[in-house]
Image (tube, rainbow, N blue to C red):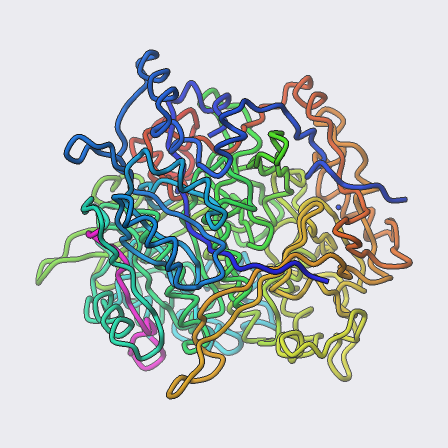
Amino acid sequence: MVSTHRFVVLIERSAQLPAAQWLRAGALTLMGLSLLVAGFGLSDASAQGPWQRKHAKIAQDLHDATDDDAVAARAARGERRAQRWERQVRGVRVVNAIVVSNARDPELTELRNFITRNGGSVQVRHGALRALTVNVPARLVKRLVERDDVVSVSPNRDIVRTASTLEAVTGALSPNVRANSTKFGYSGLDGSGIGIAVLDSGVMKAHYAFNNATGGTRVARSVNMLNARLADFQAGTDLSKTLRPGSTQQTGFEAAIANDNNFYADQYGHGTHVAAVAAGRAQFYRSTTPDTTGVAPNATLYDVKVLSDAGTGTVSDALEGIAWVIYHARAYNIRVMNLSIAAASTESWQTDPLCLAARAATAAGITVVAAAGNFGLSSSGQAVHGTIGSPGIDPSVITVGAVNFFGTNGRSDDRVARFSSRGPTRGSRIDAAGVRRVDNLLKPDLVAPGNRIVSAAATFGGSVQSWNRLAQNHYANLVTPVGISQFTPETQMMMSGTSVAAPVVSGAVAVLLQANPGLTPPLVKAILQYTAEPLPEGNLLEQGAGNLNLTGAIALARALRTDIASAIEAGTLLPGANLLAVGQAFPQQKSNISGSGFDWSRIVYAGGNRLLTGTALFSRYQPIWDPRLVWAGNTVQRQTPVYWSGTGIQPNTYLSHLVFSTPLSQTLLTSGVVRAEPLAGQSSMLAGTGAFIRTKDLSGWLAGGSGLTLTQGLVLAEGLVLAEGLVLAEGLVLAEGLVLAEGLVLAEGLVLAEGLVLAESGGVRLGFDTQGALQGE
């Protein structure tokens, strides 16, 4: 049985706070059976005040700006400061916000009418995501929250960004991936036919990095989602639109955002570098320009500009970008979405707008890769936990931390970069009883090279080209260390951060999907984790399952059927069905990269805080590989895509909306799967157990055959998952001296897209030491 209603998603960025408050405030830059009630195992219940119970749907920073008592209290403390998303209009305080709805009507007609009747205006209706960007009087926010068809209300915050060595260090040069690769040619898997959407500051289409083998561009589409109308605070208007394929509004919208003739669309410089790390090609570079071939050098790129040439944007723009990708995913075969923009958020993954949007993309069959964030060190140099950015806090996305590979092809010296954000996730929600429930999910999922990565540098201008603004402002850190003579259009620069590590994984996903197009997003994620190489140092909250191992991932992907995704969509795969391809056996669980052999991690995160292992995960169908199913803790949700239909519309192509349902019974895992969390024990930072266990130690035990084998599978029954994940008493770890953030809290009202910009001064800002993400370690 299922309880069914529809839902909307949106993107949200939390307001930054003064640096001294980042730990205590809780405010872009993301497992013998007992009832699991405490997320990752941390004690997550704490009493909340009446306003928190009443306004649980309101983001905290919006509440503080619209509640009279909160405004007065902040003013008395000298903390009140107007944000960009709020202003006085003819004596009335108005806020620019994003409203997420669960209305059955995909057009949100009643909600839109309510807003315009009460002095507000609707700026954008975000298509299948069921969200509105609105301007409303501050007094109307409380009335919005009281509506049953409103899930959450968040401010429309600003956002800002966060043989080839790269090929060698990721395993892309292994015989089963890309053999005989040189700067000027190669053979093997290269991401051909797979679309990667890059939501960032734009892509310089004219750069040689994005040429195909014949010199044409691989940037198939460029769109600019920046929308100046959002600054218009006129009341009583509804500017939302329908995206019915072929409609006048849909074609007009597409014409308005088209940026295909702009070959220099990235004056900021972040997006071009990110895109080239994922899919750059060095074939047309001069002999003096280094081989900086990306991981998927023949993948098709989709440039979705959501950040301005100054590196800033709004949440609404980013939301529109995600909606555009979802809408066109099937027509363009966009299978991967890279989000090197991470938002601060203290909201639970269940209500955070950016997480909701990422889950919608996953349900539509898009593998979403997100940067974990660059907030692993406090300004005093302490390791900080709980600073994963949104949407990396969502269980459906692949959250990527950064590896320092010390510029060598060998992996024996690799370690997690100190600046890379650590888990667990610390978003929270307030339940019906007014109790705060912290998510505490295991993150990151894995790590990848993200330190001092040389790749394409954007330029712009006429006959005389200028460096992008990042390079202009930080030439000594980003350009000088490359140490080459620079020529357009093949300029190069060096960047660091998890925003660089994320596209390494995005490129790997494209190659994986070329090898086996039948993989689903959750199955892709599990393969990358299971085959990862555990680094010698680093626990589950620092390196996840380990370092990216593309050659191992390809070996496992090729052993599986190529019709898995289509069979899941058709409902013809039953739990426990064979997933191995005809004539295939499970591959040897070892890899060799650059002469170094290692065992696979054999670790897969599931259910937010479960650790799974065993060949049955992949040799038999597990229902958690359905991308429409989301599971974390004791929460299981299903999102079913509904596509536009009608005369002249290609069937099952353009997403109209999603239907959300809550199953009361659901098989999650079959017998034969092995649970690994009993081996880890109760979490203690000092003892190095539980979530703090070294990934390599746990992996070694699993390789030896340890673990608890499920004899009857794992089933959601009457809405409950009767299995406990990793258990950690919050009071214990705090007593041990753990520095634990209450969600990623930043300052000044900016969404810090993932971290590089935090360190543009080359120093320490916002309570975090992010210098390593600017100049490398």
Which residue is the extreme one toward the top?
A: 76
| Up-down relation of residue 545 to residue 141 (above or below) | below
Q: Is residue 490 left or right of residue 29?
A: left
Residue 235 colored in magenta in the image:
no
Which residue is the extreme one toward the left?
A: 463
Residue 220 colored in magenta in the image:
yes
Name the one closer to the observer, 495 or 20: 20
Which residue is the extreme one toward the front?
A: 117
Give the extent of the magenta segment: 212-229
Name the one closer to the observer, 433 or 616: 433
Q: Is residue 162 left or right of residue 347?
A: left
Residue plotted at (55% across, 40% down): 348
Look at the image and tell me in which quarter the C terminus lies.
top left
Residue 506 shows in the view? yes
Q: Is residue 607 left or right of residue 715?
A: left
Name the one closer to the observer, 58 or 553: 58
Residue plotted at (70% across, 34% down): 692
**Rendering quarter of residue 682:** top right
Residue 503 picture location, percent across and down: 45, 57
Residue 344 picture location, percent across and down: 44, 38
Name the one closer to the observer, 762 or 715: 715
Residue plotted at (82% across, 63% down): 670
The number of discs equals: 0
Residue 273 picture location, percent across and down: 34, 55
